[in-house]
């Protein structure tokens, strides 16, 4: 079973909207969300290509120890300033989306545990 629960579906919907902005196929959104939410094993990457070419990937690294385990990456052999700029923008959008989701999730959880506050 995936480590990512169905209650987090909206987060992955939002992630894919960001990826569409970087050239991901709109028709693959349902497959992307399903892959992360309903897979037998948690996937660690999704190849979306887009502006990054064949190597454009959305990745999940739960072992990274960083504040956001989701990010966009691409093949080093395609490295150039233009793609580095696109990657930085994509990573920031994904991190901002993740941070907003986590903050809201924690606030809701806190409200359930402390209904008087």
Image (tube, helix red, strand yellow):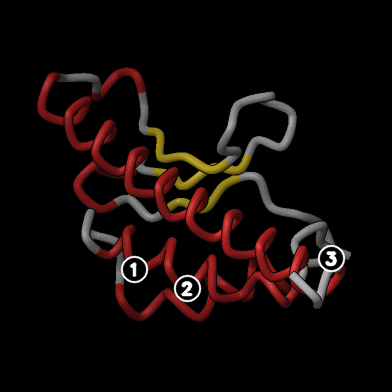
Mark 3 Cα shell of 10 Å, populated few (<14), some (14-19), many (≥20): few
Residue 40's label in the rendered image is: 3
User: Residue 109 or 66: which is nearer the viewer?
Assistant: 109
Badge 1 element: helix
What is the CA distance from the residue labelled 3 to the residue labelled 2?
19 Å
What is the CA distance from the residue labelled 3 to the residue labelled 1?
24 Å
Q: Is residue 74 left or right of residue 82?
A: right
Task: Please determine whether, in this image, residue 21 is positioned above or below residue 7.
Answer: above
Residue 17's label in the rendered image is: 1
Task: Please determine whether, in this image, residue 21 is positioned above or below residue 45.
Answer: below
Q: Evaluate if marks 3 and 1 touch, with contact meaning CB atoms under 8 Å apart.
A: no
Badge 2 element: helix
Q: Position of residue 53 (x, y in %)?
A: 25, 43
What is the CA distance from the residue labelled 1 to the residue labelled 2?
6 Å
- Residue denoted by label 2: 13
Mark 1 Cα shell of 10 Å, populated few (<14), some (14-19), many (≥20): some
Residue 20 placement: quadrant: bottom left
The residue sitting at 82% across, 57% down in the picture is 3
Q: Position of residue 75 (x, y in %)?
A: 36, 27
Badge 3 element: loop
Residue 28 placement: quadrant: bottom left
């Amino acid at each position: 079973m995936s480590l990512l629960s169905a209650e987090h579906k909206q987060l992955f919907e939002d992630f894919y909207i960001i990826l569409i902005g970087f050239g991901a196929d709109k028709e693959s959104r349902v497959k992307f969300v399903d892959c992360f939410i309903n897979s037998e094993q948690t996937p660690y990457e999704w190849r979306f290509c887009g502006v990054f070419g064949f190597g454009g990937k959305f990745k999940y690294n739960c072992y990274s120890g960083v504040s956001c385990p989701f990010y966009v990456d691409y093949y080093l052999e395609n490295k150039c300033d233009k793609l580095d700029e696109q990657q930085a923008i994509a990573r920031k959008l994904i991190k901002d989306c993740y941070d907003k989701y986590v903050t809201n999730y924690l606030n809701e959880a806190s409200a359930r545990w402390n209904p008087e506050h």
